[in-house]
Image (tube, helix red, strand yellow):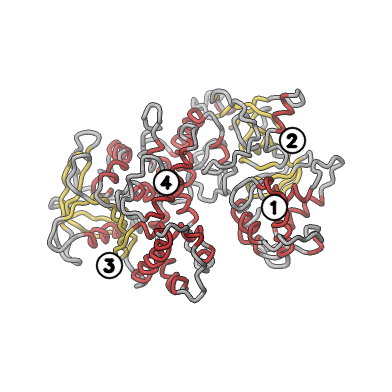
Amino acid sequence: MDSVEVARLYEHIALPEENWTRLLRLQPGNLDDLIVCDLLVTEIQTAPLFDAISYVSGDKSQTKEIIIDGHRIHVLVNLHDALQHIRKPSDTVVVWADAVCINQSNTKEFGMQVNQMGSIYRQADSVLIWVGQDTEGDAIIAKNLISDISDHFNKAYSGGGHVKDVPLLPSSSPLLDHSRWKAAQNFYLRPWFTRVWVLQEVGHAKKAVILYGQERFGWSPVVQMMLLIAERADLAAVEVYLNIGRLVDAFESIWSADFMESCWEDASPYVKDKRALCIKDQGRLTTPFKQFSNVLVASSRFLSSDPRDHVYAFLSHPTAFSKRTHKRIMNADYSLPKSDVFRRIAVTLLNEMKRLDILTIVEHTEHPDPEEIPSWVPQWDNRARGVAFYPISGILPYYNADLQEDMGAVELVHAQEDITGISEAKKALRLHGLVLGSVKAVSGVMHREDFKRKTGEIMEDGGLTNPVERAWELVEAQHFENERYLDPRQAFSLTLATGRDQYWDEAEKDLEKHDSRFRAYCRQYCNLESGLVSDKKSALDTDDRSFLTLSRTVLQSQTFFMTSDGLYGIGTSKVRVGDVYCVLFGGSTPFILRKCTEPSYYKLIGASYVHGIMRGESVREWKHGNLTKESITLL
């Protein structure tokens, strides 16, 4: 729901109270007729049968005229086109559309309606997803490919099999035809698939229908195709970019929450079963509001014209309510600036979760935020964020740097500049932990595409060295009298893998497999003289794809670093020589901090993987009296 302008000459009838809304009644008309409609005020739960429209605003400078209650109103072209295609020639149609059903100039009403968006979309008979006009003339091609792929795998799935067991499609299969996939690309790259608000709108739908120009088709096959691409090597190998990764994240964390099983009534058995598995996995997360923090993480990869909507858009999500009190985690208040919204939700999550998991989401952008958000507050609108070290699925129990040590109560204090009385807001976060050392050396930022380039080819930054080999050169350039690792090359490869395999299982469970896959990758992409290409070779050394897949996922926009005491680590692109690394009580991963001028004051740079302290080794040293617990204040 992107906020849009309706002509100010029109005055909305006031809503009597919460749980009420307005509906738009479309009068019959042909496609090119002027749109005529009227608004009716109704209680949501007793509303007449209606459909809710999900769309994106588009170009806000382009408007068209419609008539509401006898008044000529200008609405954005994309909404006009949606109404035009939804209207019927001889029957009245009742719909809900944000731009005309909410008084956009009334901040209080706007916030109230946002708080009950979930109720509106759940109450709707259908959610009509308008993705836009068929400008390329290939909507029917995309529709048929999506339908054919779903039908092909549904047959096997309905027969009791698994989609992974279906034989690989031959390259000549019509289902792999490149021209058909180009049409699908035009569809999946439509702006609708990039917006924050649509995640909630379609997530709450009893059933949803795609409107693409003159074509109509079900939502379930659209979801099924992206899930199949994530599971099937033959579909994933088609060289067409659909950008489905963020949609799969949305499916797992946003669209597959408890209390949402009744949504998507017309979903295929495959999609329903996948949702049930995700709901079961999410149900294992017992930390209060952990699931809601997962929703915010997944949604950060999407766009919104108002950054506050990265939080507000999900206040009707089931995970936004306390299981104990049934109260909403916060209410939408558009009088608050972005900095206050992000800080308040961060403090609430820290208080409720009693863990520092959300701090692992912090990843700073290139440009300082004009609203001066504290360094420890996640910027939920940062789309450039890498893969969190504590992932949204919460399936890395082997990250246990603090041994689940009690973080204590959340303590907010005045920042240094606030002590003089300039600001009353307590924006600094006081924690406790172990400062272990500093960063001694840092490699360049690693880029996803460089991992499939061999040394000698041109990399993203103009260099000629594969990022794995470049990081190893950093290791070899450093000399430590006391080597921290018995097998430095294995420790190096485990660091680059951040301790996991391509299925996010613990890599050290099968070191032979991990080592062979890393050797296979190095043999394929690194120089023989690098010291990474081992003479040792086994029958398993043929799989160079596994490490390639993993590295392109977890190392995108990350840096390899070495500590002052010889440990290897992976951190965000903002890690610099001289930063300190520490274990904070309440955090499953180590963190990188940057010293401020005052002692014990730091700025949070981000979470990290530091090989050798991920299983609580430092906390054990502290308990044995070898390290000192410190007070750490994050600005």
Task: First in sequence, mark 1 or 3: give its number.
Answer: 3
Instruction: Say what amino acid the circle numbered 4 marks.
Output: Ala
Task: First in sequence, mark 2 or 4: give its number.
Answer: 4
Mark 3 crowdedness (10 Å alpha carbons): few <14, some 14-19, many ≥20: few
Instruction: Say what amino acid the circle numbered 3 marks.
Output: Gln
Task: First in sequence, mark 4 or 3: give its number.
Answer: 3
The image's mark for residue 69 is none
Instruction: Say what amino acid the circle numbered 1 marks.
Output: His
Residue 250, how many percent across, how many down? 44, 49
Q: Nearer the viewer, mark 4 or mark 3?
A: 4
Kindly state the secondary structure of the residue where label 4 is placed.
helix
Please give the name of the residue rendered at 38% of the width and 43% of the height, measured from the top-left corner.
313
Mark 4 crowdedness (10 Å alpha carbons): few <14, some 14-19, many ≥20: some
Q: Mark 2 near mark 4, Cβ–Cβ under 8 Å?
A: no
Task: Judge whether 302 appears above or below 174 on screen.
Answer: above
Real-space CA distance between mark 1 and mark 4, rounded to the nearest whole angstrom: 31 Å
Specify the quadrant that holds the C terminus. Answer: top right
Task: First in sequence, mark 3 or 2: give its number.
Answer: 3
Mark 2 crowdedness (10 Å alpha carbons): few <14, some 14-19, many ≥20: some
Instruction: Say what amino acid the circle numbered 2 marks.
Output: Gly
Kindly state the secondary structure of the residue where label 3 is placed.
loop
User: 539 or 478: which is nearer to us?
Assistant: 539
Please give the name of the residue rendered at 47% of the width and 30% of the height, measured from the top-left corner.
348
Task: First in sequence, mark 1 or 2: give its number.
Answer: 2
The image's mark for residue 214 is 3
Task: Judge whether 625 appears above or below 573 on screen.
Answer: above
Q: Residue furthest bottom?
A: 172
Real-space CA distance between mark 4 and mark 3, rounded to the nearest whole angstrom: 33 Å
The image's mark for residue 437 is 2
Task: Judge whether 445 appears above or below 625 on screen.
Answer: below
Q: Which residue is mark 4?
A: 276
Q: Which residue is mark 1?
A: 514
